[in-house]
Amino acid sequence: MRKEKKRRVSAKHQIEIQTLKTHEREFHGKNVIVVGRQIFPVESGKQAAKLLAELREKYPDQTPLLAYAMGEETYILCL
């Protein structure tokens, strides 16, 4: 049986990961976009695309993190 390796998120996204962990109960089971210490809930794919574009423009020096918050098993969907 093959052992699965957990992918590590780059050091530049450690703040976003910590922010998700801090608010995991509040956003459990939801798609979110995280920029620094701010979390933006995502309602739909169309809204996510629009919000992502707005956040990239508003925070040009940061890369928004699109994630599905599942507590210990948070899935990073897009950087």
Image (spheres, rainbow, N blue to C red):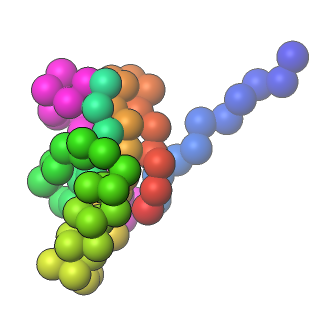
The image quarter containing residue 35 is bottom left
State the residue at coordinates (37%, 44%): 67
**Magenta includes 37?**
no
Choose top left, top right, bottom left or bottom right for residue 6: top right
Q: Which residue is drawn at 21% across and 70% down?
A: 55
How many numbered marks have been drawn onto this rendered protein structure? 0
Is residue 57 rendered to the left or right of residue 4?
left
Q: In this view, does 31 lie above or below 58?
A: above
Main SS, magenta region, reads helix
Q: From the viewer's side, name the closer residue of 77 and 62.
A: 77
The x and y percentages for residue 29 are: 31, 24
Q: In this picture, is 65 found above or below 55?
A: above
Residue 38, percent across and down?
12, 53
Spot the residue most to the front: 46
Query: Which residue is painted at 16% across and 48% down in the image?
Result: 39
From the image, which quarter does the C terminus lie in? bottom left
Residue 32 can be seen, yes or no: no
Q: Find residue 3 and report its image quarter.
A: top right
Q: What stretch is highlighted in magenta?
A: 11-28
Q: Is residue 24 left or right of residue 74?
A: left
Q: Which of 61 and 15 is in front in this view?
A: 61
Toward the top, the furthest residue is 1
> Taking the image as drawn, is residue 44 in sight?
yes
Residue 26: image x %, image y %? 14, 26
Quadrant housing the N terminus: top right
Residue sitting at the far right: 1
Q: Position of residue 18 (x, y in %)?
A: 24, 43
Q: Which residue is drawn at 45% across and 46% down?
A: 76
